[in-house]
Image: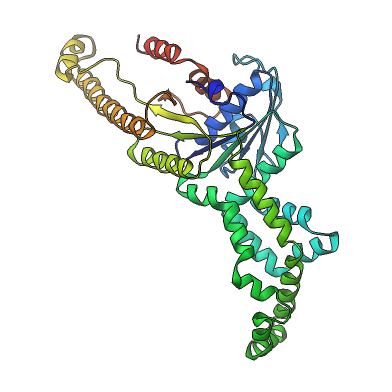
Amino acid sequence: MNVPKMLEGKRVCICGGSGGVGKTTTAASIAMGMAAEGKKVAVVTIDPAKRLATSLGLEELGNEPKLVDPAIFDGHGMEMQGELWAMMLDPKRTFDELIEKLAPDQKSADEVLGNRIYQELSSAVAGSQEFTAIAKLYDLDRDGGFDLLVLDTPPSRNALDFLDAPDRLTNFFEGRALQVFLRPAGFGMKIFGRGTGVVFSVLKRVTGIDLLQDLSTFFRALGGMIDAFKERAAAVNKLLSDKGTTFVLITSPEREPIEEATFFWRKLKAARMPFGGVIVNRVHHDFIGDVDAGDVASELEEELGPKLAARVAENLGEYHVLARRDRDNIARLARNLGGEDRMILVPYLDEDVHDVDGLQAIHRYLWATQEERDAMLADVVA
């Protein structure tokens, strides 16, 4: 298994996983590799730390894809035959754009966007990131300007929220509470017409803000967009399960990320979402076997001295512990997934991935066959 096989015939790759497992850099490496093969690829991240921009040599990324200068790959063993584009999602701006697209006219859009209630609610809703991420993905896919879209998602403890985001939006618009407020003479308007009207009146005199008018304007304008929102949610949901979409899980070999990857995979399976495979980063591979630390210290003592030789032997013992832990955790993940044939293991690299060379180092393992990966690891040990 390798990334080209995972993405064969796919136009959308959604990278899921917990935080701190190299998900953003792996997504960037996947996008870079596919672009190098001649495809026009866009990688979308929501990482506020701007690791993607830094690794691609960009000062900043905006809410629209930006072409990465192919010259930055010169001299790094990567010939860019296609195009690599990158963007960092702005959830609030994406939600505003969605209002502009779904509003029946410009007047309705301006009423909502300028409304105080919407400005507060949109910041709260967009802050969850899940729906805005796939909504942006949907727009880019529908525009048809790219051969492949690679999405770096929120941490996987939000997996259920991410997968259910379109349905939750639909349920919100179909909910009884909202319908009450949307009825011109409904219960909601009656509430505002009683004692609360006095409260709103006092607030207006004190703050100068007519909250009742803001609420009335917001719900009136929103009412004209409900059907469009529901249609968009259904289309976004369809994209997640489309045969041209695949989910690739990113994890590390520690216990908690492995459990979260299993959790995400089970949610994908239950929701019948397309699953491409798992990439396990930062794996400690053990090719030396159960070498006794005392024997190592004895063999190195003459050359390094007793103190340094003991420290090297101690370090080797600690590495063995990590390697056994990784082996056991990966084996458990493989059992949960039904086998190792859909897993790619990337070793623990000597340096942190923060530039094109780092992305290239990951790319070598993602694109290699299992036999090639074994050979590369053997060369490292040798």
Q: In the image, residue 134 lies at what x, y percent?
A: 62, 45
Q: Which residue corresponds to the image point at 70% horizontal and 87% vertical from the top-left?
A: 201
Q: In which quarter of the view is residue 317 placed?
A: top left
Between residues 66 and 375, which one lies in front from this camera angle? 375
Using the image, determine if residue 272 lies above or below residue 205: above
Query: In this rendering, would 25 be left or right of 141?
Result: left
Total marks shown come to 0
Q: Which residue is found at the position 54% from the left and 21% from the top?
A: 5
User: Viewed as shown, does residue 341 lie left or right of 217?
Assistant: left
Task: Work out whether residue 129 can be spotted.
Answer: no
Q: Quadrant of residue 298?
A: top left
Spot occupied by residue 111 in the image (x, y as percentages of width and height)? 79, 66
**Residue placed most toward the observer, 115 or 53:** 115
Q: Residue at x 58, y 40 (%)?
A: 241
Task: Check the image and report above or below for 338 versus 165.
Answer: above
Picture coordinates of residue 186 (x, y %)? 68, 81
Quadrant location, the C terminus: top left
- Residue at 19% of width from left, 16% of height from top? 291
Q: Is residue 66 left or right of residue 365?
A: right
Specify how the rendered protein is coloured. rainbow
Q: Is residue 328 above or below residue 310?
A: below
Q: Position of residue 234 (x, y in %)?
A: 65, 50
Q: Is residue 240 visible?
A: yes
- Compare residues 265 and 376 and report the one nearer the observer: 265
